[in-house]
Amino acid sequence: MKTRFRADNYIDLENITSTENTKITKSIDVPIIAGVRLDKFKLGVGPTFSFILADNKIFLDTEYFEERRSRVETGFGFHLGVLLYRMHIDLSYQYRFNQVGDYLYWRKSHQGFSQPVRFLDLGLALMF
């Protein structure tokens, strides 16, 4: 997953600077789904656990800035599936309990954003 951040420095009003960084996170998501199957349709809900395998640090050149990220993030998912002949189509909506940048701190103060983390996933499988 890629997330782009931009920071504007207004400390020196005569020399306002802007820095852009891209956060790249590699993770494994493990959804636990319970639901019902109605003929060719499946409906399910359940928690999702995302295990962070690797991520890069951003704003390394910014004084007083730090990241305190947990290696496990949690959320909840809503899943819909349909089987059409040999093709299986899955659509899921993932809502994470954390906010964008919850792990960002400046001068030891939490600086997360108020935007929630949400995903819409589409999966296709061909059965032989």
Image (spheres, rainbow, N blue to C red):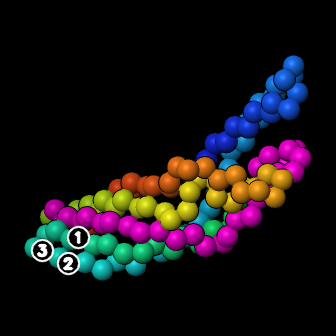
Image quadrant occupied by the N terminus: bottom right
Mark 1–mark 3 Cα distance, whole angstroms, equals 8 Å
Q: Where residue 14 sits: x, y (%)?
A: 87, 19
Callouts 2 and 1 close, C-beta under 8 Å: yes
Residue drawn 81% across and 30% down?
10
Please tell me which residue is depicted at 32% across the width and 66% down the height of the picture.
Answer: 78
In this image, 45 relative to 6: left or right?
Answer: left
Q: Quadrant of residue 9?
A: top right
Query: Residue 4: which quarter of the image?
Result: top right
Crowding around mark 2 (Cα neighbors within 10 Å: few <14, some 14 to 19, many 20+) is few
Rendered image: mark on residue 2: none
Task: Tell me where the magenta segment starts and ends, as one range.
Answer: 57-84
Q: Is residue 99 above or below residue 44?
A: above
Number of labels in the image equals 3
Contact between labelled residues 3 and 1, with CB atoms less than 8 Å apart = yes
- CB contact under 8 Å: marks 2 and 3: yes
Q: Circle 2 is placed at which residue position?
A: 36
* Residue at the disc numbered 3: 38
Q: Which residue is mark 1?
A: 43
